[in-house]
Amino acid sequence: MELDKNDQGCEMSEIRFETPQTVEAASALLAGSQGLAKILSGGTDLLIQMRSGMSKPEMVIDVKGINEMTSVKIENGGYRFGAAVPCMHLVENKAFAKTWPGVIDGCNWVGSVQVRGRASVGGNVCNASPAADTVPAMIAAGAIASVVGPKGRRDIPVEQIAAGPGKTTLEKGELVTSFYLPERAPRSGDAYIRFTPRSEMDIAVVGCGINLTLDEHGICTHARVSLGAVAERALVVPEAAAALIGTPVDEAALTKLAAAASAAARPIDDKRGTKAFRIKVAGVLARRTAIVALNRAKGIN
Amino acid sequence: MSKHHVSTVINGDPVEFLCETQQTLLNVLRDDLHMTGTKEGCGTGDCGACSVMVDGRLVCSCLVLGVEANGKSIQTIEGMADGQQLHVLQRKFLEHAALQCGICTPGFLIAARALLERNPDPTEEQVRFWLAGNLCRCTGYNKIIEAVLAAAREMRGA
Amino acid sequence: MAAETTEPQTVRVMLTGGFSRRYTNGVREFNVPAKTVRGVLSAMNALYPGLGEHLEEETSIAIDGVIHEVVYTQAVPPGCEVFFIPRIEGG
Amino acid sequence: MLTQTQHTPKEMKVVGTSPVRPDGVQKVTGIAQYGADYSLPGMLWSQILRSPHAHANIRSINTAKALALPGVKCVIVGADLPEQPFDYVGPERVAVNYWHMTRNILAREKVLYEGHAVAAVAATTRAIAEQAIKLIEVDYEILPHVIDVDEAMAPDAPLLYADMKTRGVEPAATKPSNVSKRFEFRVGDLEAGFASADEVVEMHFKTAPVHQGYIEPHACLARYGADGQAELWSSSQGHFVVRAYTAKLLGIPLSNLLVHPAEIGGGFGGKTVVYVEPIALELSRRTGHPVKLMMSREDVFKATGPTSGSSMTVKIGVKKDGTIVAADGLFKFQAGAFPGSPVMNATMCCFAPYIIENTRAVGLDVVSNRPKSAAYRAPGSPISAFAVESVLDVLASKIGMDPLKLRLKNAVKAGSPTSWGPKHSHDGYAETIQALLDHPEYNKPLGKNQGRGVASGFWFNGGGESTASVHINEDGTVVIATGSMDVGGSRASMALMAAETLGVPYESVRSTVADTASIGYNHVTGGSRVTFATGMVVVEACNKIIDELRLRAALMWDVDVTGVVWEDGYARPLDSSVGDFEPLSLKAIAAKRAVTGGPIGVESSINAGGNAPGFSTQFCDIEVDPDTGKVTILRFVAAQDVGRAIHPKYVEGQIEGGVVQGIGWALNEEYIYDKNGRLSNAGFLDYRIPVASDLPMIEAVIVEVPNPIHPFGVKGVGEANIVPPMAAMANAIYMATGCRLTELPMSPPKVLAAIDAKHGG
């Protein structure tokens, strides 16, 4: 978010409000904008940034009229859901919630019920907060984002969208339109756990998303581990995943996992937590998240 | 500056208003439509005092643009009672002394009604988590939770 | 105060350390003749001119431990302890 | 529940019941109007420009560009308000210095904290006002700042006031410092006392400032007429005090300022002072338009009073049998940018629950570059109690005594000495301890990582000036009015006491809060004084009206008034010798009001004395997550002596609410400043007050040891309940983890660090 140095006048000049009906039209508006243009899906970050003066768009583009961005559908056995689908819609989609409980964990930690009624996974990803609750779960799930821009459409893994706090790798005119979650292998489970001082209404001090698959003998054949709020953006931690793969996710594996997670964390001290605290809790959460994911893979709840 | 013309339905009545892009639904309700039952406690979606329903979805009106209300149906605290007939939740809040200063009460009532519409038989824990987005500094929440559970019982006819 | 014309019995007047340091050169205990708080204030003011004003503005009084605002008409029973303490304000 | 009242419950018909409050329906339907809910035709919107710096000289302020913006009607700065004399007036705990107050409302020579108001704009729309303040150019000379109380006392600390010399020290201070005032209360011989102790513990504590956290930001609407008649619609804990401060700061006679009591969206002490009212009224005076001024939540955190943070050292000695023989405390409180922390209360309350022959309590009032502190629920007492009640817990374990029994052994009762001089005159403390000792859960075993903590607290409660009127309507129904803002159901408790006194049903009494022109003076709704003091004057007014009703009945019967008695809402003949008359109802007497002398009404005023203190004793069971340091509350039981519960549900509500504020104070609430002295958590997202899902049901145990001076035995309930929770939680965390936390808040990083340090890692 570039802070506008020159305050004078911008409040008084009117902010354009557009409601495109296609992703191409939305992209064209972004590409054609002179000053800052912002996508409005849930607005739960954008409106706060506009109120505080942290974001001064000359154009706001409401994408909720675009079908692709607001629908949830099955595609080649997997799920495709729109970047502007409110978290509560996913939470209330029983089939989706049963298939991707970890992604739902993430959705359920975004703000309050009121905020989840508006906030979208697309907004959460593109706001690029290192502490975004849906992101580690989506990364662990191997979610692919569909991005539309002036050069057409491209698919990129979710972990490649955020560049740093408030910054994305999207180019001028590009927007994330939907996410694809591949077909679920049998004996798979995912989970997201975050740490906050309060039980609700908080920003993750540390977050961990884990997605794993077991073979018929209960040995972990596939795992992805992602950590939130311990670096400038959500991390993929292959060493942590490696600690699980080939094991029955037993005590020894969990201990290795925790160590790998803590080792991968490179947090800062800030108002929400200390460096030392985050490093330790990253390991603690990784262990706890893996146990939940494991139980879900085994169908134990 | 030119404003957006918005046509919406509030508490069942058609309403039209003009607003600037950056005006929130909360500002429009309070400043322009003089519906001050919806309160502003923070303006950042952290306190729930401005809770309203937009097309059946519980939201903070401070995090919705007025222009987004176009073509939508909005419910506020002013529409909760049926004439002189208080909603069960309103009655239970009074009977259980679930308000002290009362500034958070409209938001709690709107949020609680949204819960009971989805889950007519919530546990205490479910009520506490659903209402976590509504801050109350006076009551410690006891009597609010009791009132919501009591309303749920009565509405279930239990 | 017709009552004050007949010689009243004495009451024991106490000041906190703070007040006594500030206004009475450290003297904290007094025996004064009074039947009401007005009488107490007059007697104290006679001992230390100007003290009455300070006590009115800055204190509450504990009469045998029971806290009262400074009100002239408040009765002070014979032999009671009248303790001037800083006035408290709450939240 | 203990109950020993001068009226046995069956004598009471309505007192002690919990009917729906008179203002309830308005508050559940959105009709009730709070400070920000008022508007007038032609109204202007105001915005305040605030300092981005923690400490800076103001070289100049250029408002030309703002004034040139179309729609801007007026811009004012500090110098546009009348200058005030530099003088501390009133009781020392709350000595008001209007020279400071006017500078806190609008800065003049300097800004003293981030968020300090510098200029204010009135414009035709909210958006134009918001734009206009950005066009005001302020030339600041940035100065070094100081936030922490200990750092503010360091010899090389930046001084907020070049000429401030510590008051209350001997010999008189010669060098200026940030220490505004020193308080000391001492009795007995400390050295001898400690020498006689078997165990002595001395510990240091720090607490963070915490905000009252009311959900309604400060807001008002002001109208100043060409005839000099002004009106304010303002949300406060006392509209008479708003009138007094605003009139003084603007040089207006009180008779020219009418303040309407808007409903108040929470105060807890923080709305006993003015911030926006003088600015809005001055802008209205200069523009001739009504002016509306509302704070944002960020403004509330950055520019309104939290209570003080502190740095404290407490030393207590006990004998093996648990007798406390000596106690010594040093309490350094942050006043904020202007003098006036509640440290004097802290020094008076800290040892008040205990019989201790030798005590000393020293308090220091210290300024630093943060918002001026304001009263918060039992101002000062919770802070010093955190230290004292923690040290007592350590001593209890050292001598192997149950912490409640240690407190019971030393508990004050009527006749016990106090550390500030006079004797206690009331029981009630021991009864709260006994209530917990008798509680079935108190001796229940705990699980792994779980702990149980106890603590007690004291608060004076309040009396003071109140006025009430009672009128008998033409149909025999009753209207009562007071000038005490209703922050939590006092309209209901006033109606209950009136109905009980008159012998009529609660439903026939209409209870209202009147504006400053319609009723005599009432002091603020604070200090737990309203049900006691205003209740007392309501009863007095009702008794006067009963005498008037007896007089009217005597006229109707043509008998002497001595022959008429008032019973259960009827005038009755004293006995058959008076005559055989049907009892006269209020309705019957009201019907004859004209021929018996006209409307029936009285107004009474008092300066209520005889208030009795409040004691609260609490225990909590908690569980600590040893891997994250997160504390979960399993149970919280709070016993409080309220004297008499007039409306038990609202009494419980006060206890439950006070405890939960204490839980926030204990676990998460704090002000986080960056290196530039800017507050980095000025919002409800990162200033973490408890949410519903953080808590169990709080169990309130109402203890009733009546105050004989109040007609119904009331002592007060609003404040004592917030005193014990911080220490109770710290003591429980110690039992659960073996770690003694001495800094608030006891947030997860602090708890985890303590656990790791204990286990070497």
Image: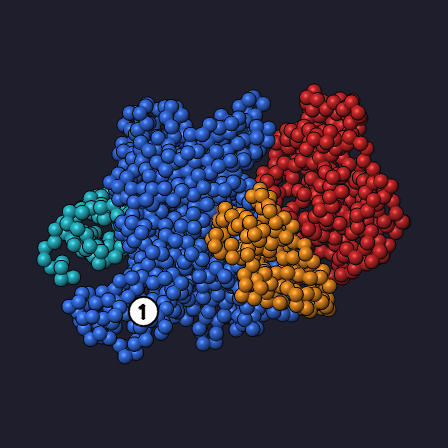
In the image: residue B96, left or right of residue D12:
right
Q: Which residue is pictured at 41% across the width and 71% down the height?
A: D256
User: Percent position (x, y) of residue A43?
Assistant: 70, 53
User: Percent position (x, y) of residue D37?
Assistant: 54, 64
Q: Which residue is pictured at 22% across the width and 65% down the height?
A: D565
**Observer-nearest residue: A254 or D114?**
A254
Of the 4 image quadrants, the one containing the C terminus of chain A is top right
Q: Colour of chain D?
A: blue
Q: Colour of chain A?
A: red
Q: Which residue is pictured at 70% across the width and 52% down the height?
A: A118
What residue occupies the far bottom of the structure in this picture? D595
What residue does disc 1 label? Answer: D586
What residue occupies the far top of the structure in this picture? A252
In the image: residue D475, left or right of residue D737:
left
In the image, the chain rendered in cyan is C
User: Percent position (x, y) of residue D540?
Assistant: 29, 61
Mark 1 belongs to which amino acid?
Leu
Give the secondary structure at mark 1.
helix
In the displayed structure, D637 sits above or below D524; it is: above
In the image, the chain rendered in orange is B
